[in-house]
Amino acid sequence: MTVSPPAGDLIQPFQVERYGLRGRLVRLGAVADDVLGRHDYPEPVAVMLGQMMAVAASLAGALKYDGVFTLQAQGNGPIRLMVADVTSNGDMRAYAQFDALQVAQLQAMGTGGVSVPQWLGVGHLAFTVDQGPDTERYQGIVDLFGMTLAECVHHYFRQSEQIEAALKVAVEHDPAAKTGTGWRIGALMMQRVPGTGGIDEDGAPMPASPYDEDEREEGWREAVILMGSATSAELTSDEIGPNSLLYRLFHEPGVRVFKTMRLQSACRCSQDRVATMLRSFPKDEVAEMKVDGKVEVKCEFCGRDYRFDQPALDRLFAAGSAAE
């Protein structure tokens, strides 16, 4: 299933010119509606997965890759697993696995909010870039350290990349919305780049900063304060254009925008992919998966069901034997 992106489904790269800061503004409208509305998750699970999508899009937009960027959070809390991935073509998908009873119990307690310690518990956050079979996969892993997913990402950058970064995420839900399921997601991310030797969004060398380290440090603090002034409503609004918001925030130090990356909700599952997956298992194990004479596989991302009866399984393994 694919949903075409309206103006709201995008990653907008930008730079705060005066201080040599690089950033991304993320907006998810139809993509959020499709992913979060499809599964009818409990509200806290949907909000947490929405935050996951915002973080994934922000990080993917900051990378140069040709393939798939995957963000995965795994813990021992009521939400056991969340996965969101973004291809270099802008296809995005996500899903969550959770313990329904534990989620209901925590909701009944009325604690409010969706903190990482409460809902994910102890675990880790993993970043993976897969550019195909002929390239080495990049993966970074960091403990879930922080009250929010944004704080966990800050921890990752401090520990693993030694890069100063700031990230702000917003997830809004209006069940009474006239269109879609009422979900809107927004995010702002900024990173400091070197005073010399940096590359801008177009791949061109950035001029050396005219400011000394103290001035650049002061500029970073100022930019973070300006970014923090963005409200959740501004980050998720369909009515405030990305460039209008960036100008409102950073017009004084100067902001420059670059080519927008469009996002769309799309799943990469297919009958062939599922068949390849089943073929990787021993034949007797696949036989044990049968229910009422059929093997059924459901895509966690889009919910599509794939069914293989005995003749289909025979053809599947016969094709595998011939390929060998």
Image: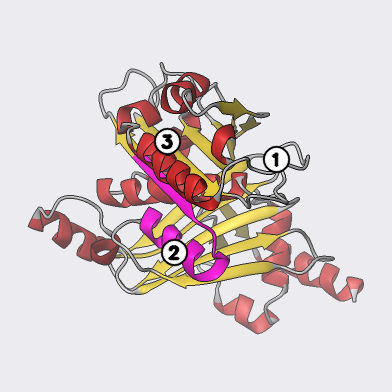
Magenta segment: does it hold 169? Answer: yes
Crowd class of label 1 (few under 14; some 14 to 19; many from 20; radius 10 Å) = some
**Residue 82: where, in percent of width, then height?**
43, 59
200 vs 63: above or below: above
**Residue 101: where, in percent of width, then height?**
21, 64
**Residue 102: where, in percent of width, then height?**
21, 65
- Distance from label 2 to label 1 (Cα)? 30 Å
Label 1, secondary structure: give it: loop
**Label 2 amino acid?**
Ala
Crowd class of label 3 (few under 14; some 14 to 19; many from 20; radius 10 Å) = many
The residue indicated by pointer 3 is 186
Which region shows up in magenta? 149-170
On residue 200, the disc is: 1
Which of disc 3 and disc 2 is earlier in sequence? 2
Does 183 sit left or right of 67 as displayed? Answer: left
Does 23 sit left or right of 179 as displayed? Answer: right
- Of residues 5 and 224, the one drawn nearer to the viewer in this rendering: 224
Which of disc 3 and disc 1 is earlier in sequence? 3
- Of residues 190 and 269, the one drawn nearer to the viewer in this rendering: 190
**Label 3 amino acid?**
Gly
Label 3, secondary structure: give it: strand
Label 2, secondary structure: give it: strand
Image quadrant in which the N terminus is located: top right
